[in-house]
Image: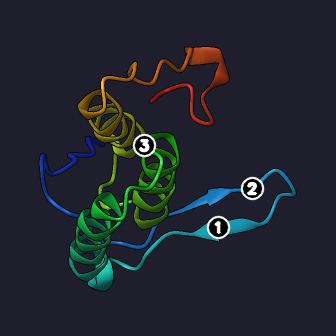
Amino acid sequence: MTWVVPFGRFKVAPNSASRQDGKLFQFCPPSKVEEQLKLLFSLYEQYEYENIDPIILASWFHAEFIRIHSFVDGNGRLGRFLSSKILMKYDLFPLIVEKQNRADPGE
């Protein structure tokens, strides 16, 4: 059976991840993804003007983006890319996360 992931589309089914204690962490429900992303980017713009340390800002953004988990696949890669863009905007180095240190080595 072939499973096709819709490229560039938000998830349509709930998704979760296993925590270290074995419990499941439920990501944002599909019906709330667009609303939560709009809020995330709105808060990012607000926090950016409040002169929050760029490392804290990028870390917060990454954590929130991953919590929303908008897509079926690629959330980690896109989150690292967007966080890196924030850091580079302030002339800081981008994120470098070695494969063996990722929560999901496939990402």
Which residue corresponds to mark 1?
Answer: 25
Q: What amino acid is found at the position of numbered circle 3 in the picture?
A: Pro
Give neighbour class at mark 2: few <14, some 14-19, many 20+ (Cα, 10 Å). Answer: few
* Helix, strand or loop under label 1: strand
Give neighbour class at mark 1: few <14, some 14-19, many 20+ (Cα, 10 Å). Answer: few
Q: Give x and y (percent) for residue 46.
A: 28, 70
Question: Could you tell me if the residues under marks 1 and 3 are in contact, i.e. CB atoms within 8 Å?
Answer: no
Give neighbour class at mark 3: few <14, some 14-19, many 20+ (Cα, 10 Å). Answer: some
Q: Give x and y (percent) for residue 40.
A: 31, 69
The C terminus lies in which quarter of the figure? top left
For residue 19, which numbered disc appears in the image?
2
- Residue at (45% x, 24% y) in the render: 95
| Chain-order first, disc 1 or disc 3 | 1
Q: What amino acid is found at the position of numbered circle 2 in the picture?
A: Arg
* Helix, strand or loop under label 3: helix
Residue 73 found in image quarter: top left
- Residue at (41% x, 55% y) in the render: 61
Q: Give x and y (percent) for residue 60.
A: 50, 56
Q: Measure how far apart labels 2 and 1 are at the Cα level.
A: 6 Å
**Seen in the image, is 19 located left or right of residue 88?**
right
Extreme right residue here? 21
- Residue at (78% x, 66% y) in the render: 23
Question: Could you tell me if the residues under marks 2 and 1 are in contact, i.e. CB atoms within 8 Å?
Answer: yes
| Chain-order first, disc 2 or disc 1 | 2
| Chain-order first, disc 3 or disc 2 | 2
Q: What amino acid is found at the position of numbered circle 1 in the picture?
A: Phe
For residue 87, which numbered disc appears in the image?
none
Q: Give x and y (percent) for residue 100.
A: 65, 16
Return the residue nearer the eye: 39 or 2: 39
Q: Is residue 47 above or below residue 53?
A: below
Which residue corresponds to mark 3?
Answer: 54
